[in-house]
Image: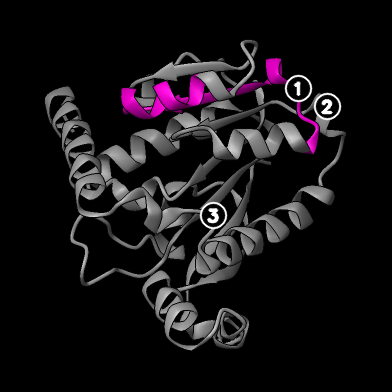
Amino acid sequence: MSQEEHGQELAQVASRYAKRNQAHSEDRYSLLRPEVWQMLQERQRAMLRLLALRPGQPADWRLTEVGCGAGGNLLEMLRLGLRPEHLTGIELLPERLNLARPLLPAALQLHLGDASVAPVPAASQDFVLQSTVFSSLLNDGVQQAVAAAMWRWLKPGGAVLWYDFIVDNPRNPDVRGVPLRRVRELFPDARLRSQRLTLAPPLARWVCNKIHPAAYSLFNSLPLLRSHVLCLIEKP
């Protein structure tokens, strides 16, 4: 795809995020909501189990996050023991990066703009993290460009940590599911391990608010009701 088409798609991503923020209050994503903290804690447990099996120690790992938003995932990595100077965040939207900067140590690098051209050295990262970024990239060429950059940044033996939708949301045309076959297309040389997580958010909100927060685990025990996957995408 041309640079112009690439730039147009990124502008549309920013527009879709702005529209989404207008449509939904921040309260919808508050950690005080029972469905939100249960989804978050489920993902955290699964990711920690994966990381516990990786070689080395957190203090030595280098990690870049694509689409770091307001910095929540980077804060998790700091709590895990990664050093600020070994962490990098990349964010397309300036208003979100402005929220992240005061929360994060000065030694942690933050870059604004297109991840596919971010100044991350090749073969320098132990991990590259993306969480619900690719489902917002509706253009296959942009997905491919960002995935190629992520793969280039990884050291041999490094891994992409991937968490995203696998199914379309018929009520939200601004996102699309990224099934496992597409993940394999984006990273054809990788060894891929995946697990299905997260009760579909519309259902999770209904269950926790109309039945009881404890019912989240009951419904989530049915794999077909889970809408996301967590993948470890390893570079040989």
Q: Residue at x 57, y 86 (%)?
A: 215
Looking at the rendering, the stretch of residues picked out in magenta corresponds to 80-101
Q: Marks 2/1: CA distance?
A: 6 Å
Q: What residue type is labelled 2?
A: Ala
Dot 3, how many residues are within 10 Å of its Cα: few (below 14), some (14-19), or many (20+)?
A: few
- What residue would you read off at disc 3? 31
Residue 129 at what x, y percent from top left? 56, 40
Mark 2 and mark 1 residues within 8 Å of each other at the beta carbon: yes
**Contact flag, marks 2 and 3 (Cβ < 8 Å):** no
Closer to the camera, 59 or 185? 59
- Spatial separation of the CA atoms under disc 2 and disc 3: 27 Å
Examine the image and state in which quarter residue 227 appears.
bottom left
From the viewer's perspective, is 143 left or right of 79? left
Q: Nearer the viewer, residue 6 or 30?
A: 30
- Kindly indicate the quadrant of the structure image that contains residue 73: top right
Badge 2 or badge 3: first in the primary sequence: 3
Residue hosting label 2 = 59
Q: Nearer the viewer, residue 171 or 181?
A: 171
Mark 3 against mark 1, which lies toward the viewer? 3
